């Protein structure tokens, strides 16, 4: 239940609300739109340690995850269920296999994380190519969008 609630609430707030509203309904590009939510998302995970190197790893890991989830949502036609499922799947693995004491995780947790990230990026690109769609996040939408 914790994996479901965390994934759903975090994706609703950070991707659909903070990122989604800025990216979809303003001229802001992907990078400026994702920054506020990703910084806040990463900061809220810093309770997991007191050691500087671990905190740095947790921050970078969760910040990168927030960017990935926002990219995935954008590329799948702003379908929030795609990052919710991805977030749930990663959280569930963490809980079922005791992958780590914090968001940084250990070696096997990060191998799983790397495989998952690689698969979602590949599936997204394959989906876009097969459907003949252009990537939503591209040079023209990275910083500012033309309206």
Image (spheres, grey):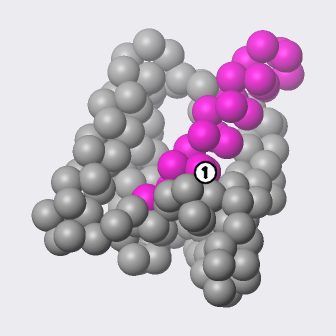
Which residue ends up furthest to the left in the rendered image? 130
Between residues 142 and 2, which one lies in front from this camera angle? 142
Between residues 53 and 79, which one lies in front from this camera angle? 79
Q: Give the x, y percent position of residue 145.
A: 65, 73
Q: Which residues are magenta?
A: 49-72
Q: Give the x, y percent position of residue 138.
A: 50, 58
Q: Is residue 45 left or right of residue 9?
A: right
For mark 1, does the 10 Å Cα neighbourhood hold few (<14), some (14 to 19), or many (20 or more) residues? many
Residue at x-position 44% and y-position 13% = 107
Between residues 35 and 95, which one lies in front from this camera angle? 35
Check disc 1 and report the residue beneath it: 66
Q: Is residue 2 above or below residue 29?
A: above
> Magenta part mainly helix, strand or loop?
helix
Residue at x-position 55% and y-position 56% = 139
Q: Is residue 38 above or below residue 22?
A: above
Residue at x-position 30% and y-position 31% = 115
| Residue 93: quarter of image | top left
Could you tell me if residue 108 is visible in this image?
yes
Q: Is residue 55 left or right of residue 89?
A: right
| Residue 48: quarter of image | top right
Question: Is residue 98 in the magenta section?
Answer: no
| Picture quarter with the C terminus | bottom right
> How many tags in the picture?
1
Residue at x-position 56% and y-position 44% = 65
Question: Is residue 50 in the magenta section?
Answer: yes
Q: Give the x, y percent position of residue 3.
A: 46, 55
């Amino acid at each position: 239940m914790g994996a479901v609630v965390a994934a759903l609430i975090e994706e609703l707030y950070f991707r659909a609300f903070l990122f989604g509203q800025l990216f979809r309904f303003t001229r802001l590009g992907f990078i400026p739109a994702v920054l506020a939510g990703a910084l806040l998302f990463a900061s809220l995970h810093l309770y997991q340690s007191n050691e500087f190197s671990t905190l740095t790893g947790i921050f970078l890991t969760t910040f990168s995850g927030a960017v990935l989830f926002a990219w995935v949502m954008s590329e799948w036609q702003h379908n929030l269920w795609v990052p919710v499922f991805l977030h749930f799947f990663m959280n569930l693995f963490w809980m079922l296999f005791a992958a780590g004491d914090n968001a940084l995780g250990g070696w096997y947790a990060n191998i799983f994380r790397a495989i998952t990230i690689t698969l979602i990026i590949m599936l997204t690109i394959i989906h876009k190519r097969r459907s003949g769609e252009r990537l939503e996040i591209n040079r023209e939408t990275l910083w500012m969008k033309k309206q």
